[in-house]
Amino acid sequence: MRKKTLRYLVPCMAMALCSIGFTSCSDDDEGGVPSGPSITFGGENLMSVDDYIFWYDGNGRCYKVSDGWNDDVVEIDYETGMIRSDDLGTEMNISFNSKGYITSLSASWNLNEDGEKYSGSGKWTFSYNGSGQLTGEKINSKESYSSEYEAYDYSITLNTTYKWEGGNLMSGSTRMDAKEDGDEYTMTDDFTVSYDETLENPHRQFPRVFYKLFSNGLTDSYLHLFGMVGMFGVGPENLPESYEDVFEEEGYRPERFSGTVSYGLNADGYFDWERINGYRYDYEYGTPNVGGGQKKLAPKTRQGMSAGKTGHWVRDMFMRYRDRK
């Protein structure tokens, strides 16, 4: 299965982290549950970017993203420290640092369907430098499977390093190594970004094109939408103008993608629109009517989690690569 097809499968939250020798700094320290928003925009909240809508609780924290059809894409329950996607009743633990940046997700699963048994676990971590820039991600996951006809043990290590220069994100390099009963294979995805250094990003906003690059063939995840509301650190000092992305899998010819980016800023210097490959994404800001805060997750979901009955969303997130073989 090739990269273009993977983009439309069940969203996977498997990205990657920093290079060997990276030293964590204070921004990586766990800070508990955020007490307020990670960022505001001239005293307002980011309400939408094109067809993605951002929702806030009584403390001004973004707890949910929905799409243009009002379907929940990804949702955080700050009270319990859980995150879920697509309203499937399957969740993961989520952690933050003292600035409200997302630092880790973890989960385990046990499924038994028609004699097929899946048992596994995964953890996804994020690292930042002292300037609040996202420097890398890492995921480690493993699974044991058995049925009447076969059995296997499978593991994945996926690492991404982000390189910043002069306040700008210049590149990202991802490598995935998978192993099944001693059989190993590798995939890589590398992107570069160029900037118009005459155009400043006054408030260091996290642009939508970063979500596109972070959610490439190996790192497809709705989670990175939270970057646009400040939950994955600060954005670049200048405005991106183009990018290139190269995806490579053992036994196949490399796939190359490229694009252009342009921006319009409002009177306060925040993004008014962002155009990626000719498509315009409009930004809207305002003060949300949060009422009594976020909606509580259903009791049956809480009971399912306490009983260890996580479902397919979590497994698909950490194990999607096995089916590429």
Image (tube, rainbow, N blue to C red):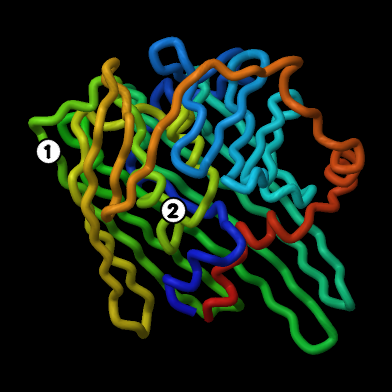
On screen, 110 above or below 263? below
Crowd around label 1: few <14 · some 14–19 · many ≥20 (10 Å)? few
- Residue depth check, mark 2 versus mark 1: number of the one nearer the observer: 1
Q: Which residue is mark 2?
A: 215
> From the viewer's perspective, is 143 left or right of 54?
right
- Three-letter amino acid code of the residue under disc 1: Asp
On screen, 279 above or below 206? below
Q: Which residue is mark 1?
A: 196
Could you tell me how far apart the alpha carbons at marks 2 and 1 are, in whole angstroms? Answer: 23 Å
* Residue at 32% over, 36% down: 273
Q: Where does the image place residue 277, in percent across and percent down from the top left?
A: 27, 55
> From the viewer's perspective, is 251 left or right of 119?
left
Secondary-structure class at tag 2: loop
Is any atom of residue 152 visible in this view? yes
Residue lying farthest to the top in this orientation: 43
Q: Where does the image place residue 100, in percent across and percent down from the top left?
A: 52, 22
Residue lying farthest to the left in this orientation: 198
Q: Where does the image place residue 191, in percent across and percent down from the top left?
A: 27, 56
Is any atom of residue 164 visible in this view? no
**Front residue (pair 311, 17):** 311
* Residue at 23% over, 47% down: 261
Q: Where does the image place residue 73, in percent across and percent down from the top left?
A: 62, 46
Q: Which mark is residue 83?
A: none
Secondary-structure class at tag 1: strand
